[in-house]
Amino acid sequence: MPKHKGISCFLMNMRQPGVDVRPLKQITGSSEFCEVFMTNARVEKSDQMGKLGEGWAIAQTTLGYERGGRALARVTNYASQHSRLVEAAKKMRRHGKPLVEDPLVRQKLGRIWAEIEVERYQALRTLTLLERGEHPGAGGSLTKLSYSELEKRYMELALEILGPYGQLTEGAPKEFQLEIDTAVGEQGSWAYAYLWSRAGTIYAGSSEIQKNVIGERILGLPKETRADRVGGKT
Amino acid sequence: MNFSFSDDQVLLKNSVRAALEEHCKSSHVRAMAEDGKGYGDELWGEMGKLGWLGLPFPEEHGGAGLGLVELAIVLEEMGRAAYPGPFFSTVVLGGLGLMLGGSAEQRDKWLPAIASGRARMTAALLEEHLDWDPASTTASATKSGSGWILSGVKRFVPWAHVADVILVPARSADGLSLFLLDPKSVGVTLSPMKGIDLTNRWSEMRLDKVAVGAEAIMGQPGGAASVLESLLRRAAVCASAEMLGAARRCLDMSVEYVKVREQFGQPIGSFQAIRHRCAEMLLEAENAHAAVYYAAWALTAGAEDAAVASSICKSYVNEAARRVCGDAIQVHGGIGFTWEYDLHLYMKRAKALEPLYGDTEYHRELITRHAIAR
């Protein structure tokens, strides 16, 4: 693909004149990614990773691991959130009964628990693969699509059950708090986890990109006619 | 632990697929759909020779001594081929039922007969209210001399019309009990219940004061609940395996079709609207695969989460199969709605199994009970 040619990969010293890092404030209120401006910043020949022009392949490999990695840790996190959710549903009441006795709420809790467990089974399959020295490859796209879409459904359900408690960033009573750290090591809240769940289907290749990868590389479906590819053929 | 198939399991899968591709083409499936009995003796005999009919039974009973993972592999392939016949009812409902609750004499009598292809079985697990909880059983068993008198109505009994013996739950003075019934006994009336899946046969079974001997009871009077619960879990996972196979077939047919069907001068599989749907179908099939084989492994290994894993499996696969088979019809367009095209054979197989051995809501409630007690 012509547009992938000429890309090389470097390790760059961030502490030098000409490198300007501007954190981007996200909808969570925190900043986990940044804009990086480089104005005549320097890299040495020894900073080059791989060969000249091999940057695309290196980026793809990195993305493959980013998509497929730490799946079991993620599932453990989901499971402890589920326990907190069940505890909260025992404390809240609807129509004079604990919320956890409401059949609709029970159906939703059961459904999401099944989905979380299926993620765990899949993580065990991935581990078996890695243990045998195989790279997840395009299968990482299935993993990433699966967990990121699940996480959105999960957090919507959490906020449905918790009501306005789920939206609190301050002043939440202890029983309605989420005692899990955030990606940046701060005390987590349901509100943060809910907002953060919107990131998963965008970062490391959006769900739409993952579905293209799955369609083309796993199912072998024909590529769509895209302007950049049409240009490549002529 | 190793969560991929062993070499032997891959061999089994390949050999089952090859045998069914040879003996169970869609022409055979369609012929059996029109057949009075509904399945072919030739293929049944072949299945006996290949060792499928005794797959999970101990070797001393003519079986292969394999576990539920291997049984699920065979069943997935049967779902994939829409295999018409009493394999599930005989080996899963009958055979596993006997292994779980049968006396030594009962197992000695029936398991070798099943494994060799001589006997067919089924179980009558549903009554008119469709409650899967064994405790809901209303059919009655009254002591009469050394034997029993059975009365009641059972519905949706699979392959009862060809069964040599049927497992029948009934309530006696001691509580829920389980009986082995010869459907040719006086007072048994079978009438067909014809559904959309013509590769499957159901009967209503009326028991009007049917006399059975003392040897008909399985286990102790009043002691059937735990056997039935264990059997239901296995049936749920085995049915899920068939549904997975049916869904895989629908997915594979869709992927092949959208590569060749053209619209606006391009294969429709090149359009994101179609490609993304196919990617979602694959994800559902892969997750269903994980749910089926984890549960099959957990039940065989006696893992502590085996019970909840079987509920997770059935509830997940119910929805996944519905989605994959339904989307397959959608991406095919008009041809997918025709009788002549094979897609509906697999879609209907999955649909017929969806409400059986616990529907989605039944299993989700069990999952929540587990999660709350965690």
Image (cartoon, coloured by chain):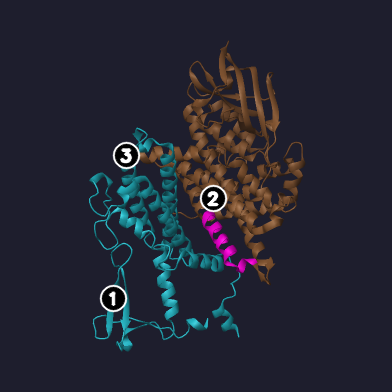
Chain colours: A cyan, B brown
Chain holding disc 2: B
Q: Amino acid at mark 3?
A: Met
The tag on residue B320 is: 2
**Secondary element type, mark 2:** helix
The tag on residue A151 is: none
Gap in Å between the C-alphas at discs 1 and 2? 44 Å
Label 1 Cα crowd, 10 Å radius (few <14 / some 14-19 / many 20+) = few
Chain holding disc 3: A
Gap in Å between the C-alphas at discs 1 and 3? 43 Å
Q: Circles 1 and 2: CB distance less than 8 Å?
A: no
Q: Quadrant of residue B266?
A: bottom right
Q: Main secondary structure of the magenta part?
A: helix
Q: Amino acid at mark 1?
A: Arg
| Residue A199 shown left or right of residue B9 in the figure | left
* Residue where numbered disc 3 is placed: A92
User: Which portion, as a residue range, is magenta?
Assistant: B268-285
| Residue A229 shown left or right of residue B311 in the figure | right
Camera-nearest label, 2 or 3 = 3
The tag on residue A22 is: 1
**Secondary element type, mark 3:** loop
